[in-house]
Each structure stands twice: as structure tokens, then as C-alpha cells.
Amino acid sequence: MRRETEIETSMAATARSGHDRFLETRTFGSLDGLRAVSILAVVWHHTPEHFPALSIASRGFLGVDLFFVISGFLIVTLLLRERRRTGTTSLRKFYVRRFLRIFPPYYAMLAVVAVAAYSGRGSEAAAIRRDLPYALLYLSNLVPMSSLLSITWSLAVEEQFYLVVPALAKYTRRAFPAIVALAYLLLILPPFGVLPDVKLPAFFRETTFGPILLGVGLALVLDSPRGHRWVARVLGYRLSPVFAGALVLVACSHPAADISGWPRLAIHGSLLALVASCVVTERHAAAPFLALWPMRRIGAVSYGIYLYHLLVRHGVVKVMSLGGVSSSIVFFAATALTSWAVAEISYRLFEVRCLALKERWT
């Protein structure tokens, strides 16, 4: 009996120390690498003629879902740690930080696109002029978008998340986990036809907010010593990210053309397992790959790559058509590398000045 008590005490101490290390982690080393994976998947999705025989080759848009899981986890983790440290969370500081990080490059991109659209002619310019007001107001996920501004739907989702969830986390406190769980259940129902047949925007029917709420749930679970202990028991092994990554590949290879419903939820679950296995402990087999300089750097400027890659793609299409090149791999590499270069220029010459102001609000 005494021996069993000693073992239980030792296990509890180990769990506490693991949770303490998690709480002391200021920067999750694998998240930039995972962001790089997500943005490269999106760039690949916008590559023409990409191996139609392979179903997974057409699923690059799921990179956005991975980014959503990361975002939900990271934002709420930071809010919970601020509350643990100070006893409350400052919404004013949160919104100022988000404003300085997101708005300047976003509206700079919209300004460039608007100038080109209003000075040009043709169907593409007309489509941009029609879509621009929705992009300006972060409403792109609520209406059909037909121009290169269609990518702003995911940024609208993020802004709507920032508007609602931090305030709920602050003012509901104990009820917040239950609210998150209930919201998730309601938001995943439309693809199953459970709710009345109303005309919901397409992105709502594709459980757009589901991955973000899964990330929020992961943050809440790992913030608790007991929750961290259970996640570590399941996903805290060195090879866990490798198996989780394999599970993602299998889930994303679903042969059906329409993956809404259970296939999409299975994909989200595998993405959640991947992120959880990479943050519950920093010591795992995928860490050396995710920590490579190109992966970390692409992840660090992934927001800029996302903003600019369709503009870059437009130029790459013209250059490759003039050169008679049609290789999907070459097109992807040219788009990814050029988008990375443009994002670096934007970051170093423009965004970094706004981020310097952001430090005053941490």
C-alpha cells in the first residue's frame, strides 16, 4: 500500500513538473513550423493542374484549418496565462496588439488591390470592386466572393473570433469551457442537416469555426494540471507527432469529393492531435524538422505570404505562360519562394515598425 502511494505521489509530481514546464514555455518551438506547413499547403492549393488523381493533392485548403487550430490554441493560451499572472485580462491591450499585427499589412494589401481594380478594366477588376467592401469590413466569409480577395474569408473568421472569444473568456470565466463546447456542437451540425433548412453561408456549412474552437478547447485542457496530465499520457511521447501527422495524411486522403460532415470532422480531429502532440511537450521527434530555419522563418512571415500569394500567383502565371512552362512543381516553387520574398520585404520594411509599437502593450 505504501509502495503504491509512493508511486502515485511520484507520478503526480512528474505531471506537475510537466505542467509547470508547459506554463513556463514562452514560445512553442514547433508552432512556426506548423504554420509553415499550413501556408505551403494553401499555396499548393492554388497551384493549377496538381495531380488530380490523388485526392489529398486537392486538399491544400485544409492548411487554413490547421492554422485555425493553432490560432485558437495560442490566443486563448496567452489570455489564460495573462489572467493567471495578473488576475484578469486586458481586452484593450489585446485588441491593440491584434490591430498592430493584422491591420497594417492587410489594409496595405487591400489598398494596392483597390488601386489596380479601379484603374483597370475587365471582369477581374469588376469582381474585385464588388468584393472590396466585404473585405474592408471583414465580412468575406458571409457572402460569395469571386475575385482574388476571396482569400480574405479566413481573415474575416479570425477577426470575428477575436471580437467574441476573448470577451467571453474574460466575462464568463467558469462558464467559458461549457460555452465553447456548446458552440462547437452547434457549429458542426449544419453539414449533417440537423438544423432547419435555412440558407447559411457556405463557410458556415463547412464548419469554418470548428477548428478554432478545437484549438480553444485544447488551450483550456492544457491549462489545467489534470488536463495536461491526460493529454501527456496519450500524446506526450516522442513519436506522437509522427503518428499524428500520418493520421492527418490518411484523413486528408478520403476519396470522396465532398468531405463535409464526418470526413471533415475526422480531419479536424487529426489536426488537433498533431498540434496537441507538438505543444504538450517540446521534446518530440518532429521538433528537429519543424525547427529548421526555413520552416521557422516561413512560419514567422506566413501571414504576409497568405496576404500576397495570390497577387504573386497572378504574376507567376504570366511569366510562366511567356516561357511556355507548365510544370505544377515549378509553378508551386516559384509562387512559394516569390511570396516568401515579398512577405519578408513587407515584414522587414513595414510590419516590424508596427510590431515595435505592439511591445508597449504586452
Image (spheres, rainbow, N blue to C red):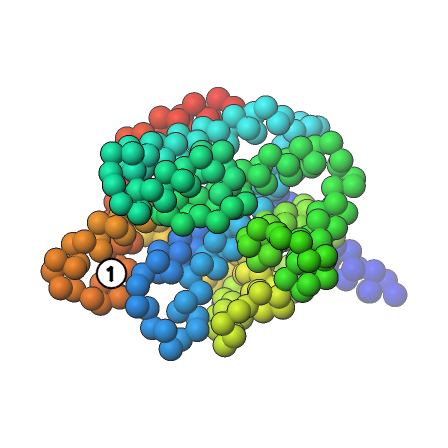
Q: Residue at x 13, y 64 (%)?
A: 324
The reply to whether residue 288 is in sight is no
142 or 254, nearer to the observer: 142
The reply to whether residue 332 is in sight is yes
Query: In the visual, does 25 lie left or right of 318?
Result: right
**Residue 152 falls in which quadrant of the image?**
top left
Q: How many marks?
A: 1
95 or 31, nearer to the observer: 95
Q: Residue at x 47, y 38 (%)?
A: 134
Q: Position of residue 118 (x, y in %)?
A: 29, 34
**Residue 276 falls in which quadrant of the image?**
bottom right
**Residue 275 falls in which quadrant of the image?**
bottom right
108 or 130, nearer to the observer: 130
Q: Residue at x 58, y 69 (%)?
A: 263
Q: Which residue is mark 1?
A: 331
Work out which quarter of the rendered image holds the N terminus and state it.
bottom right
Q: Residue at x 70, y 28 (%)?
A: 87
Q: Position of residue 48 (x, y in %)?
A: 30, 63
Rendered view: 163 above or below 208: above
Query: In the visual, does 117 lie left or right of 255?
Result: left
Q: Position of residue 85 (x, y in %)?
A: 65, 31
Q: Secondary structure at mark 1?
A: helix
Residue farthest left in this picture: 323
The amino acid marked with disc number 1 is Phe
Q: Give the crowd class for mark 1: few <14, some 14-19, many >=20 residues within 10 Å.
A: many
248 or 203, nearer to the observer: 203
